[in-house]
Image (spheres, grey):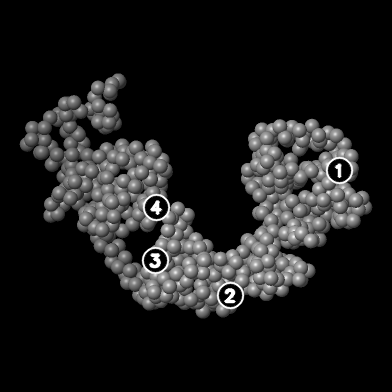
Amino acid sequence: MEHIALYRAWRPQSFKDMVGQQHIIQTLQNAIRENRTSHAYLFSGPRGTGKTSAAKILAKAINCEHGPAPEPCNECEACKRITAGAVMDVQEIDAASNRGVEEIRDLRDKVKYAPTEVRHKVYIIDEVHMLTTEAFNALLKTLEEPPPHVMFILATTEPHRIPATIISRCQRFDFRRVSLEEQTERLDLICRQENIEADSDALQYIARLSDGGMRDALSVLDQISSFTDGRVTYQQVLDMTGGIASEQFGKLALALLKEDVGTVLQMIENFMQEGKSADKCMENLLYYFRDLLMIKMVPQATKMTERVLEPEQFKEVAEAFTKEQLFSMIDTLNRYQSEMKYAVQPQTLFEVALLKLCSIPGQAGDAAQPTAQHSGAAANQEDVAVLKRQLAELEKKLERALQGGLAAGAGQDASSGSRQAPGGRAPAPRISAPAKLPSQLDRYIAEKSGEAFAAAGRKWSQILQGVKEAKVTVHAWFMDGEPVSVLEDSVLVAFKNNIHRETTEKPANKQVIEKVLHEQLGHPYRLVTMMQKDWNAAIEGVPDQPAEEFQLEQELDVPGKSKEPWIDEAIELFGEDLVVIKD
């Protein structure tokens, strides 16, 4: 007798055979019982959760010779022929290969004719999101007001790709992923019926691999049972699927914690010799550390783990790590996993990722953390006190400068022969102050030759390119600036033109730049800006001349210079030949 795949042989033929969709089954059965079925349904959800099976069962239930009934009898001629796909009035259409407007127009023309074999015409359109826009438009009116003898059942895994006008004309049912317990029970039932001996932990692992899809679980079971001559064990499932036992992950995790590089590299080599793929190992290891984090943070949530079948046995491993270490490990593995898609040598990248994990600080560093935090808090308080004193001194200097500014400005004009404003009245002095406090600016100056600034300088061309790819208009303004220093979590950029600087400082533009800085430098950085002339003056200035911090400048009538600052900026940007000044 020809073998039939398990997922085909065990396709549900009645509502009671379906697994894990009780909310949908009860609603449909009540609608049939009360004669309140709709003319159009939309079944959406992940693959292998029973959408097409439910559509066929519904078609049988409303066309059963002993019905309509909440459950099809599967014994009458109508039920048998619908199951075999031999009834012309119940059609299953694959929208992936019949996605054009002509096919839908043909369907629309046939809808008007009465059924010839059963009570209702039923059109099951699978993967309906593949239809073109024109096809959806052709289906729209028919879907809204079909003849009373027609029912449409649309099935899709991607409901977001279906127009809202289609969704609003259907009753929508969202199929959920089948739970681990329900899948395991169903697999155990099928194994007993098919005379397959299977260990419970093997079935549980198969259910976890299927990610909530019953069809995927049956396909894996079918494959493994053929390989093992009817005896399915946990180790055989691991060998067939390329998985790694939780115990091996536990040894690898402890080796990473101890920074035992030799053991880590040897285990990777053993995985490769056993035929495991580097990307699959990376994925499984990522799931494992996620499970350890779940065990550590939610001790009672034993069902939330993906690759650890017995969470109780791994609590000791979870306790050996801190939450910060696990978060850092997951973040590192996730970053390397995304890079592995384009890697020529995935094994090498996997080895580099695990060596990177070995460098994450261990328990000793964490034990010293409270003391470090305490000393850091004390240092912060001292810094605040120093800043307060410096701010008070600056306020006093500013007050003295304001009091003596007019007289000093007039004396300077007299000695230098500067031309005064019309009427013999000296113009008001303008005070220009640096963007940062002197102490902060001094720190930037001290770090202008630091390693962090050198690293940023080496990647500056990539940063500019990243800004250009993110938003070309921001790149046009940002090109005017150049990095001059990096201090802790901030990058100082000096601009030649004030308009470019102000536009770059706008929150939306600044957010784009800071996102690119984070991506390129691997650490979140704030963007700090100042004028190039102020930076040059700061690094060339004499430290013992505090008067340079606040300079009194006269607004003088210089020939060729206008009294309006924006006119000067326009001339500087576009040139005198292109600027016409009108009153």
What residue would you read off at disc 1? Answer: 120
Q: Disc 3 to disc 1, how far (Cα)?
A: 64 Å
| Viewer can see residue 108 | yes
> What number is the disc on residue 152?
none
The residue beneath circle 2 is: 311
From the top left corner, tell me how far across and down residue 311 is, in percent: 58, 75
Dot 1: few (<14), some (14–19), or many (≥20) neighbours within 10 Å?
some
Q: CA distance from mark 1 to mark 4?
A: 58 Å
* Mark earlier in primary sequence (3, 1): 1
Q: Nearer the viewer, mark 3 or mark 2?
A: 3
Residue assigned mark 3: 356
Q: Residue at x 12, y 54 (%)?
A: 544
Which element is circle 1 on? loop
Q: Earlier in the sequence, mark 1 or mark 4?
A: 1
At label 3, the amino acid type is Lys
Q: Which residue is mark 4?
A: 519
**First-in-chain label (3 vs 4):** 3
Residue at the limit of the structure toward the left, as seen here? 415
Q: Nearer the viewer, mark 1 or mark 4?
A: 1
The quadrant of the rendering that contains the N terminus is bottom right
Residue in the picture at 24% in, 60% down: 389
Q: Nearer the viewer, mark 3 or mark 4?
A: 3
Between 338 and 292, which is closer to the camera in this rendering?
338
Identify the secondary structure beneath mark 2: helix
Disc 3 from disc 2: Cα separation:
26 Å
- x then y, percent, for residue 249: 51, 72
Q: CA distance from mark 1 to mark 2?
A: 52 Å
* Farthest residue, direction front: 1
Q: What amino acid is found at the position of numbered circle 1 in the picture?
A: His
Disc 2 marks which amino acid? Pro
Q: Residues within 10 Å of mark 2 (few under 14, many from 20)?
A: many
